[in-house]
Image (tube, rainbow, N blue to C red):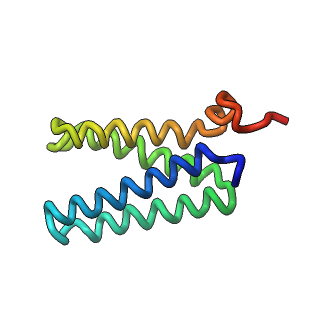
């Protein structure tokens, strides 16, 4: 796991942001959106587990796709004009790219030795 520091950091950041969003949405809307958010979090946790335990490229691609699609859906949501909405769109897109290209990033910044 030590050689995948960029991927693990992106995953930890993703989980922190998801949990914060769940709290913020609960405080603003109430419990009506909690079931859908729990499903989203569960799917992400399953994919993350597959990535970290099996080094699954399919799960890596699906997690990336989740973030990219979330950013695209965010563009057309009614909250996309607010600052938080724009930040979340950018977050999902950037995290998706970091997760997908983590090997390349680690090689470029010297965290991974090419053998």
Assign the C terminus to one quadrant of the image: top right
Residue at 14% x, 63% y: name it: 29
For this orientation, the residue located farthest to the top is 108
User: Can you say whether 80 is above or below 34 in the image?
Assistant: above
User: Can you say whether 30 is above or below 104 in the image?
Assistant: below
Assign the N terminus to one quadrant of the image: bottom right
The x and y percentages for residue 58 are 60, 51
Would you identify the image quadrant in which residue 75 lies? top left
The x and y percentages for residue 27 are 17, 64
The x and y percentages for residue 55 are 68, 55
The x and y percentages for residue 68 are 41, 41
Would you identify the image quadrant in which residue 50 lies? bottom right
Number of marks in picture: 0
Residue at 35% x, 46% y: name it: 70
User: Can you say whether 8 is above or below 85 in the image?
Assistant: below
Q: Is residue 114 left or right of residue 103?
A: right
Q: Is residue 44 left or right of residue 75?
A: right
Which of 56/27 is in front? 27
For this orientation, the residue located farthest to the right is 115
Which of 24/92 is in front? 24
Residue at 43% x, 36% y: name it: 94
Residue at 56% x, 40% y: name it: 100
């Amino acid at each position: 796991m030590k050689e995948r520091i960029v991927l693990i950091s992106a995953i930890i950041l993703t989980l922190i942001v998801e949990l914060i969003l769940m709290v913020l949405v609960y405080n603003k809307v109430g419990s009506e959106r909690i079931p859908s958010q729990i499903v989203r979090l569960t799917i992400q946790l399953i994919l993350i587990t597959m990535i970290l335990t099996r080094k699954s490229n399919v799960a890596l691609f699906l997690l990336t796709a989740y973030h990219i699609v979330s950013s695209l859906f965010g563009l057309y949501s009614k909250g996309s004009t607010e600052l938080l909405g724009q930040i979340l769109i950018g977050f999902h897109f950037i995290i998706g790219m970091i997760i997908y290209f983590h090997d390349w990033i680690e090689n470029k910044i010297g965290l991974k030795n090419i053998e």
